[in-house]
Amino acid sequence: MADMNNTQSDAHDMGLHTEQLAGRSRKVFFTADTEEHFTPAWECPVDFQREAELDASDLDSREVNQRIRDLMSEGFGSITVRNPGARHGLGVGILNRLRLQFDGSLGYFGCGLLDGPNVRVSGRVGWSCAENMMSGTVVIEKNAGSTFGAAIRGGDLVCKGDVGSRTGIDMKGGTILIGGRTGAFSGFMMQRGRMIVLGDAGKNLGDSMYDGLIFIGGKIQSLGVDAVEGELNDLERKWLAEKLARYGLEAPRGVENMTKIVSGKQLWNYDNLEPAEKKLVL
Amino acid sequence: MCGIAGLIYRGEQGGIGREMTSMLHSLKHRGPDSTGFALFGPVQEEQNILRFKLAEPQEMFGENQQSNFQIEEQLKERRRLVDERLQGLGVELHDQQQFTDYACRYSFTYQGDGADLARRIEDIEGVEILSMGKSLELVKDLGDANTVAARYELESFQGSHGIGHTRMATESDVDIRSAHPYWAFPFNDIAVVHNGQLTNYWTNRRDMERRGHRFTSKCDSELIAVYIADRLNQGDTLEAAMHRSIEELDGVFTYLVATRGQLGMAKDVMAAKPLVLYESEQCVAMASEEVAIRAVFPQEIDTWDPYDGEVMVWQT
């Protein structure tokens, strides 16, 4: 990111401000004075050198999540969960620094409501992975279901395979990086943040997006309402190269040939438009 | 919400009853009201397999205790009428089984018109055919998968493929009539399970009824079974019929259809209902949630979601 520092002010203006890839994003919501008196109920210092394993074979989701919390409170900073068995709601609500590894697949709503941990899933994840993530990283080695990264606000969410439909719906920040293909309605009502898709994108890409940036490496089946093609600039090319390298991914045709999609902003103040104008926009 | 699942072995028979039970039991949380199986056993070219019910469970165990005394006699009479009509049609019965007070399985030889036979049986008050064919055996009842499988002795069922459903009743009653799978009356060996809602159900149903198709329920899923059978009857391939259904059926849905040698999936253009797929050289498995696939394939496997408007068909 060294080169990025020189252009940080430009990047900020363009919505490409740098983010903490690990750590507590919520710090920005409190003043120094407030934060001094604010102690989350279960924030705990952990040591990344202390490693623990957890076999989920005979545990339900609630028990697995409770065990992760218990291990964190005991100071374990690196936790590996074996045999997650595609159960729903695993690894959710972790507001702490942690290295968390799932050896296997997760079901629905895995890794939701995260703020801080670095998670790796060796298998596939079901629908709504990492919903509402605030910060940290979640890396999926295989495929993911629909509504991947819905409403995330920060952090990096990576799927190295294909994802389903409505990826990044309502996203408000952070970065979603897809190594393969994404389905229909990806980036629907996106408000901020960046989405990178190295493969093809399904129909209605970026439908009704307010803001944010989408980069597509493959073909786009169709653009959604008010999504338009933008011009890729040098800063974005650098940023893309940096981001892909960080996760060991490459754009099949090179980052310089990726397509950038932005909001046409014709839907802004939609309610104030006359009916005839609405028809023109849609 | 409902859960659907399917499993097809490539070129071999297997413990389809046991494995479908495991898959469907894993989906119990998506629909605890009823569970149904459409299992395809070895094809019996010379024989027909008929699964039918004599009454709804509510009639047996209703709050009105007086009804219970009456229903026992009614069930005997209904079954006597079924036997009488089959005999009258010249059916050669080979085997008769009764799994509950209201659920029967017959195997028989019959050279006549199957549709005519089905209509004559269903003409008896309270009697409904669940399936008829050379391979298909359709079982559905109230309760979870383990309960239904035990009641109908499905653990030992050997076959090539099957589909199943766990139902959460939303738009129709909790009864067998509204449970899935649906047999495509009167066409042999076609069954459908569905997760979703069809928004042009009545338009299509009226059109089908005008053309002579019969419906036993007000469940929109039944329409898919009849629709597919109607298209097959008009000469479409299964794949073509399913592609056409994506165009003509409105709503949000994912459905599975199984015929004597095929199993297919279709997803609506919004991709609003889930399905996860696993494909290997030996078999193809699919379910609303991966947890159902993991119930029979606990080892590390690659799974993925089909996309909007997608149709896939596999052969046994």
Image: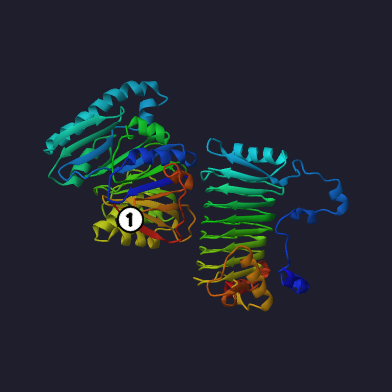
When asked about the image quadrant of residue A137, the answer is: bottom right
Residue corresponding to mark 1: B314
Quarter of the image with the N terminus of chain A is: bottom right
Above or below B120: residue A211: below
Residue at 41 percent of width and 50 percent of height: B286
Q: Nearer the viewer, residue A46 or A167?
A: A46
Give the crowd class for mark 1: few <14, some 14-19, many >=20 residues within 10 Å.
Answer: some
Above or below B159: residue B224: below
Q: Position of residue A27 (x, y in %)?
A: 79, 54
Q: Position of residue B79 (x, y in %)?
A: 23, 30
Residue at 42 percent of width and 33 percent of height: B143
From this viewpoint, is residue A246 visible? yes
When asked about the image quadrant of residue A63, the answer is: top right
Q: Secondary structure at mark 1?
A: strand
Chain bearing mark 1: B
From this viewpoint, is residue B168 visible? no
Answer left or right for A49 relative to B27: right
Q: Nearer the viewer, residue B3 or B142?
A: B3
Answer left or right for B222 relative to B268: left
Q: Position of residue A71 (x, y in %)?
A: 68, 39
Q: Amino acid at mark 1?
A: Trp
